[in-house]
Amino acid sequence: MQMQIDIITLFPNMFSGFFSESILKRAQEKGHMNINIHNLRDYSLNKHKSVDDYAFGGGAGMVMQIEPVDNCLSSLQEKEPFDEIIYTAPDGDMLTQGLANELSLKKRICILCGHYKGVDERIRQHLITREISIGNYVLSGGELAAAVITDSVARLLPGVLNDEQSALSDSFQNNLIAPPVYSRPADYKGWKVPEVLLSGHEAKIEEWRMEQSILRTKERRPELLED
């Protein structure tokens, strides 16, 4: 099954480099993911192609208007509705590995990138199905958040990674931080790889990795163990 992600943005060129390299490039070339970028200004009906205006009641900052967003979403859903319409909001649900897993099972997702002071609240009330944040901070726009969401989902799609087991052993997949990893040489400047990893004893290696995952999680993200 091919996943389709449509991203609505005011700055489509921001995605060109990010989506044309590494895993996201591979996901598209292999036909596992189709990413479409839509310029919101193309759906503005005024001659200046503006998509923002002053906020009712005054105050600093411009607001993204509802009409172009509604026009864009209506046009993109003429043949098939989206499974999710996501707005990248600082106060949305926090992006977690569990949420990425859930989204990876969808067939068609739309991501609306916020800008300025935000979007007209009616967009959030009537047009959006889910709001997602990538952290408790504010960015200049939602494009970076949209790219992060897309990347977190793409690597979970079957066939995208060369080794599909890799995604299953990532941090947070089982509410644990991934264990330490090592590569050659086994001894560098006296800094040695743990002997168990050189033993070839698969059961002992897996036991060590689980112990290290629990220990690292307890030290760095103890709240995950509570969950």
Image (cartoon, rainbow, N blue to C red):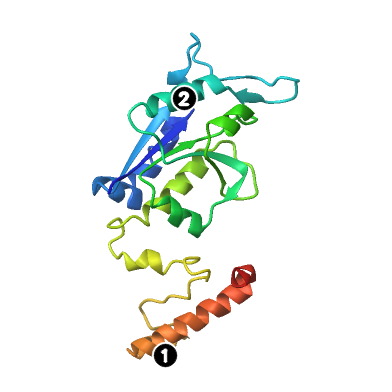
Residue kind at label 2, given as amino acid type: Leu
Q: Which mark is residue 40?
A: 2
Mark 2 residue element: helix
Q: Compare residues 97 and 216 and report the one nearer the observer.
A: 97
> Going by the image, does 136 lie left or right of 18?
right
> Going by the image, does 145 lie left or right of 62?
left
Residue kind at label 1, given as amino acid type: Glu
Q: Which mark is residue 195?
A: 1
Q: Is residue 193 visible?
A: no
Q: Are marks 2 and 1 in contact (CB under 8 Å)?
A: no
Residue 137 point in image, percent of width and height: 65, 46
* Residue at 68% from the left image edge and 26% from the top image edge: 61
Name above or below for residue 115 compared with residue 4: above
Q: Compare residues 158 and 209 and report the one nearer the observer.
A: 158
N-term-proximal mark, 2 vs 1: 2
Mark 1 residue element: helix
Residue 193 point in image, percent of width and height: 43, 84
Q: Is residue 69 visible?
A: yes
Residue 222 point in image, percent of width and height: 63, 71
Name above or below for residue 73 compared with residue 159: above
* Residue at 30% from the left image edge and 55% from the top image edge: 160
Tell me the crowding category of disc 2: few under 14, some 14 to 19, or many 20 or more residues within 10 angstroms, Cα based. many
Q: Nearer the viewer, mark 2 or mark 1?
A: 2
Name above or below for residue 63 compared with residue 36: above
Residue 64 point in image, percent of width and height: 58, 25
